[in-house]
Image (cartoon, rainbow, N blue to C red):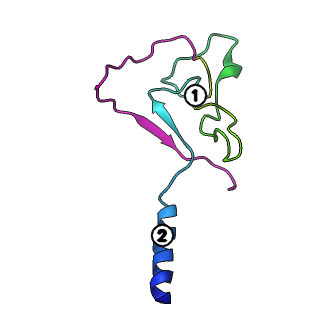
Amino acid sequence: MKSFIAAAAILLSGFALLTEAHISFRYPCPRRGAYSECPQPASGDWSLIDYDIRSPLGTHDAIVSPMCKWPSSFAGVRPVFQAGQTVNATMDIGAFHLGG
């Protein structure tokens, strides 16, 4: 029985390696996204770009940002989707940090 529990624990811990917590849309562009295909800010507003778009929105104790980190986006052409339409979304995955 102990060997079964140990094998199950090893198997389940392997699934943790397949998960990713730092993720953002690349297409459709997130608001104030730093990606080249996203609408760009007006001149002088470059400090408004969110270069840390994949940072957590908060912790289990406190939500720092609402689900949409920014209330508005930069002016520019945005895709328009119809209800039921298939959207080929692109995700940007991963963040470089020292853990935590």
Which numbered tag is attached to residue 68?
A: 1
Mark 2 secondary-structure assignment: helix
Q: In which quarter of the image is residue 80?
A: top left
97 is within the stretch colored magenta = yes
Q: Identify the residue at horizontal 59%, vertical 17% (top origin).
A: 72
- Drawn side of residue 50 relative to residue 27, left or right: right
Compared with 46, 92 (above or below) is: below
Q: Give the range drawn in magenta.
A: 73-100
Q: Name the residue under label 2.
A: 12
Alpha carbon separation for disc pair 2 and 1: 32 Å
Q: In which quarter of the image is residue 64?
A: top right
CB under 8 Å between callouts 2 and 1? no
Mark 1 secondary-structure assignment: loop
Q: Which of 79 and 42 is in front in this view?
A: 79
Q: What residue type is labelled 1?
A: Cys
Horizontal and vertical percent position of residue 47: 71, 21
- Drawn side of residue 89 relative to residue 30, left or right: left
Horizontal and vertical percent position of residue 42: 62, 10
Q: Identify the residue at horizontal 61%, vertical 34% (top origin).
A: 53
Q: Nearer the viewer, residue 43 or 7?
A: 7
Please report whichever mark, 2 or 1, sits nearer to the chain's N-terminal start: 2
